[in-house]
Image: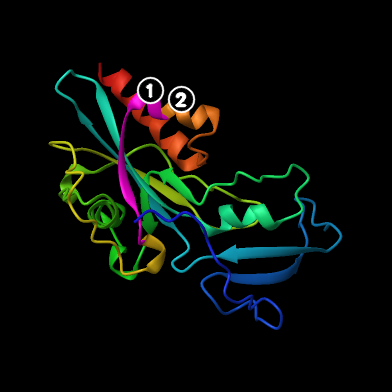
């Protein structure tokens, strides 16, 4: 079953606290301290955080029989994007998608601390979201970490890459993480340049995915 719409059952914003819920918001007053000891005027600064704060994006790829590079993405529900349809935006977005194709990704958890933690999380998410079992040893860092929205959120994304031994089985069930948000998800396999083209023209409107795929193309070109 593929999700096609979204219903808002309750808006708990009025009276809600900034320190409860999946996202927390620190509402601060801050100021700059300059190298000569002077300071700027105070100004408000809100910081949005998710549980665990940081995340891992897994770039999964394999070579097809014809030698082409194929990448494995996951499609899932993204309610915040869909709900743009309800907002009075400067540039209205009546076609904001509910389902988005992205790199496999997930938040770091307590068990991911220490060396190799990013690879362990990447392997776990590859199984949950793409249905593929990849040994932790198959993963390697793909460039430095990146802040997707540094003006509002403190989240940092680490990129991990792994070559799969074979294409994922499209009929294999996706284990998921037990969250209702992951229900209706699917695996999408695209040729690398085709996937990058979809990022560029807006059919895959996710920045971490474009960054990860471009880094993969650069790494493969260097290896060649």
Question: Residue sitting at 43 percent across and 66 percent down?
Answer: 52
Vertical side of 204 occupied by 12: above or below: below
Give the answer, above or below, for where 191 lies relative to 106. above
Left of 186 or right of it: where is 199?
A: right
Quick one: 98 or 66, which is closer to the camera? 98
Membership of 187 in magenta stretch: yes
Q: Secondary structure at mark 1?
A: helix
Instruction: Please tell me which residue lies in front, 38 or 175.
Output: 175
Q: Which residue is mark 1?
A: 193
Which residue, as the protein is rendered here, is positioned at the far right? 41
Q: Are marks 1 and 2 in contact (CB under 8 Å)?
A: yes
Labels in figure, total: 2
Whether residue 166 sits left or right of residue 211 in the image: it is left
Place of residue 213 in the rendered image (x, y in percent of width and height, measured from the top left): 39, 32
Q: Is residue 136 left or right of residue 222?
A: left
Residue lying at the far bottom in this picture: please name it.
15
Residues drawn in magenta: 183-195
Badge 2: how crowded within 10 Å, few (<14), some, or many (20+)?
some
Q: In x, y percent, where is residue 90?
A: 78, 45
What is the number of the mark on residue 121?
none
In the rendered image, residue 98, in percent from the top left (x then y), is placed at 51, 52
How far, Cα to Cα, is label 1 from label 2?
A: 6 Å
Residue 132 drawn above or below residue 69:
below
Q: Which residue is mark 2?
A: 197
Where the C terminus falls, by quadrant? top left
Q: Residue 33 placed where, x, y %?
A: 76, 57
Occupied quadrant, residue 48: bottom right
Question: Residue 37 sits in which quadrant?
Answer: bottom right
Q: Secondary structure at mark 2?
A: helix
Q: Measured along the vertical axis of the image, is residue 24 above or below residue 204? A: below
Quadrant of residue 217 within the rendered picture: top left
The foreground one among 152 and 191 is 191
């Amino acid at each position: 079953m593929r999700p096609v719409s979204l219903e808002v059952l309750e808006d708990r914003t009025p009276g809600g606290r900034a320190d409860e819920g999946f996202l927390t918001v620190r509402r601060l007053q801050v100021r700059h301290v300059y190298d000569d000891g002077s300071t700027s005027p105070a100004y408000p600064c809100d910081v949005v955080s998710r549980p665990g704060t940081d995340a891992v994006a897994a770039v999964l790829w394999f070579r097809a029989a014809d030698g082409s590079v194929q990448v494995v993405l996951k499609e899932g529900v993204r309610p915040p994007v869909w709900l743009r349809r309800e907002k009075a935006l400067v540039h209205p977005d009546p076609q904001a998608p509910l389902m988005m194709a992205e790199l496999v990704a997930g938040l770091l958890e307590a068990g991911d601390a220490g060396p190799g933690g990013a690879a362990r999380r990447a392997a776990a998410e590859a199984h949950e979201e793409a249905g593929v079992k990849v040994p932790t040893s198959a993963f390697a860092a793909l460039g430095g970490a990146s802040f997707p929205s540094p003006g509002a959120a403190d989240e940092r994304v680490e990129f991990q890459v792994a070559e799969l031994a074979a294409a994922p089985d499209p009929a294999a069930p996706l284990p998921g993480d037990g969250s209702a948000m992951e229900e209706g998800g699917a695996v999408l396999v695209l040729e690398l340049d085709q996937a990058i083209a979809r990022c560029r023209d807006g059919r895959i409107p996710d920045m971490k995915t474009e960054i990860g795929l471009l880094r993969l193309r650069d790494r493969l070109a260097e290896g060649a």
